Image: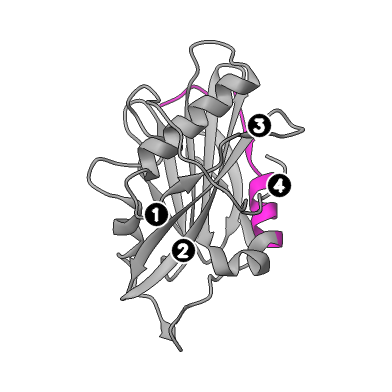
């Protein structure tokens, strides 16, 4: 996962099912629900700035994966019987990163990985207002594949366009998915820090899924 994508000028909606299980979503919540759970400061009709503190290494309890995350962000495990999921949220709840790890039944091509990623993005965020997504996933030099998408969320009576960058990679028998969601208008200021977070991801394929 080598870089944070910039939004494209024209986005299209594609998708199908990823075994019926979105990597991010839980049955009881939507992206808008989660963004609305934390208080948000509104100053001069603009969304409060995302707060990214110094990074510290988060390691999943079994050692399955690690990620450099801001030390001031909240961590929540939202795993189920099929997928390990961990959600990282900034203090005001207006940006988040989620990592999901699941078993891969076979070796997948770059095109297949891209299709799975688009399907999962569609299943997870497709019902959000103004949802839009890249037509073509972008292969990365490290073997991962990425896609960019946007949607609109109402936060404290303010309509906010959120920019999502999603990545998928296969390591041996595991698939890893990462979603990074930030306010689109703050992307340029956050890019360097987000790049560090994305590039810090590491998985230990010798560790079994819980």
Q: Are marks 2 and 1 in contact (CB under 8 Å)?
A: yes
Distance from disc 4 to disc 2, alpha carbons, whole Å, reads 21 Å
Which residue lies under the disc numbered 3?
Answer: 144
Residue 28 x %, y % = 22, 46
The residue lying at 27 percent from left, 49 percent from top is: 29
Which residue lies under the disc numbered 2?
Answer: 161
Question: Which one is in front in this view, the residue at disc 2 or the one at disc 1?
Answer: 1
Distance from disc 2 to disc 1, alpha carbons, whole Å, reads 9 Å
Relative side of 86 to 141, left or right: left
Question: Which one is in front in this view, the residue at disc 4 or the one at disc 2?
Answer: 2
Secondary structure under the numbered disc 3 in the rendered image? loop
Residue 197 x %, y % = 64, 52
Q: Earlier in the sequence, mark 2 or mark 1?
A: 1
Residue 156 x %, y % = 32, 75
Which residue lies under the disc numbered 4?
Answer: 3
Which residue lies under the disc numbered 1?
Answer: 130
- Residue lying furthest right: 141
Q: Nearer the viewer, residue 106 or 77?
A: 106
Q: Is residue 200 magenta?
A: yes
Q: Residues within 10 Å of mark 3 (few under 14, many from 20)?
A: many
The residue lying at 70 percent from left, 28 percent from top is: 143
Question: Which one is in front in this view, the residue at disc 4 or the one at disc 1?
Answer: 1
Considering only vertical position in the picture, is 55 above or below 105? below
Q: Earlier in the sequence, mark 4 or mark 2?
A: 4
Distance from disc 1 to disc 3, alpha carbons, whole Å, reads 27 Å
The residue lying at 48 percent from left, 64 percent from top is: 90
């Amino acid at each position: 996962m080598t870089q944070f994508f910039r939004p494209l000028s024209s986005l299209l909606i594609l998708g199908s099912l990823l075994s019926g299980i979105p990597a991010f979503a839980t049955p009881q919540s939507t992206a808008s629900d989660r963004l609305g759970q934390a208080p948000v400061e509104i100053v001069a009709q603009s969304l409060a700035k995302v707060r990214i503190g110094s990074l510290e290494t988060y390691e999943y309890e079994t050692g399955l994966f690690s990620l450099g995350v801001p030390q001031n962000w909240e961590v929540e495990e939202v795993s189920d019987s099929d997928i390990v999921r961990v959600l990282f949220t900034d203090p005001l709840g207006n940006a988040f990163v989620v990592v999901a790890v699941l078993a891969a039944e076979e070796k997948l091509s770059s095109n297949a990985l891209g299709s799975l990623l688009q399907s999962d993005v569609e299943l997870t965020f497709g019902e959000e207002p103004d949802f839009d997504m890249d037509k073509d996933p972008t292969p990365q030099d490290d073997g991962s594949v990425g896609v960019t998408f946007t949607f609109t969320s109402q936060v404290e009576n303010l309509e906010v366009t959120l920019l999502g960058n999603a990545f998928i990679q296969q390591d041996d028998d595991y698939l890893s998915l990462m979603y990074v969601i930030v306010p689109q208008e703050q992307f340029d200021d956050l890019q360097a820090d987000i790049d560090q977070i994305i590039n810090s991801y590491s998985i230990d394929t010798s560790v079994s899924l819980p």
